[in-house]
Amino acid sequence: MKLKRINTSEIIWLIGIIIMILIILFPIFVMFKYSISDRASVVTGGKPIPLWPYHPTIEQFKTLVTTDRFISAALCSIEVALTSVIISLIIGTPAAYALVRYRFPGIMVLATLLISVRLFPDIVSVVPVVEIFIKLRLINTKIGVALAHSLLSIPYVIFIAMGVFETIPKDLDEQAQIMGASKLYSFVRVILPVALPGLAAAAIYVFLLSWDEFIFAYFILAFGNLSTLPVMLQKILSWTPQHNLLAAISVMLSIPVIIFTFIVQKYMRAGATAGAVK
């Protein structure tokens, strides 16, 4: 049996891939190492910080999961992020479909204006949004934060969904309507299943945007008892906590995102041909 010869270019590619993997994994390793570090491994008195904790512990995680403030902020962030995903997809998906399927004069100008909303920095947009939300009595409410995050994410959903719908042949719509389906039925039962992979990617993006967003959440929840995790983290940083506590919070912040991504990924795989088969 002959062994396949590996040429120089393949070796270079392999080395490059290994280096990139190490670059990606190193921050994750450091975060996890600090999250399970004991006090002696963090406060070393001028000595070099050990590569691995002297006495690994999960006390930081126990402290977080038994703290009502952290649990309340985590539940608030999850609820706000999921609500933002639902609102953004419900509004952005039909809007993108209409922009792709129904051509009319000025459509590109309209699409550009919708997407250009994100050209403005968040710190510029937060003042008028908060002023409007005060009048609508949406300050210090979860739905207020979710709506604010939806304002940020809907342009991205429209942009992503437009690219998805442009790849779906218009023949699918026409064939469904020839067979007696209404436009709404063909959109919901034929087009959406085919578009699921792209919409799932948009949902992951919206969840990440809402989960990490700080400025709007801070201003909308500034005068109440509610708090999202980024807002709570900012309050914790005000008293300079140890690195192991911050790392434990970072790990806990990552877990819901990973879980949501794995849940949504099945729709990315299952939706590729579902609508075409129907």
Image (tube, rainbow, N blue to C red):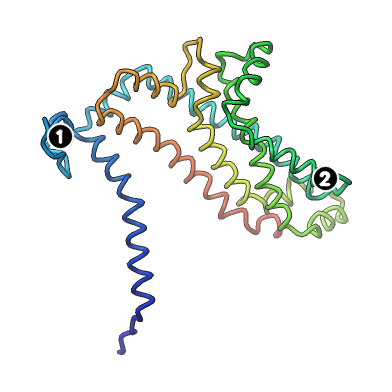
How far across and down, in percent of the image, does residue 8 sit? 35, 79
Q: Quadrant of the N terminus?
A: bottom left
Q: Which mark is residue 41?
A: 1
Identify the secondary structure beneath mark 1.
helix
Please, what is the three-letter code of the amino acid marked with disc 2? Ile
Among the two numbered marks 2 and 1 on one chain, the one whose residue lies closer to the N terminus: 1
Residue at 63 percent of width and 26 percent of height: 125
Please, what is the three-letter code of the amino acid marked with disc 1? Ser
In screen coordinates, is 257 left or right of 117? left
Picture quarter containing residue 113?
top right
Picture quarter containing residue 184?
top right
Above-or-below relation of 234 to 32: above
In screen coordinates, is 242 left or right of 68? left
Q: Quadrant of the C terminus?
A: bottom right
Q: Which mark is residue 107?
A: 2
Above-or-below relation of 15 to 86: below
Residue at 51 percent of width and 10 percent of height: 223
* Nearest the eye: 120 or 258: 120
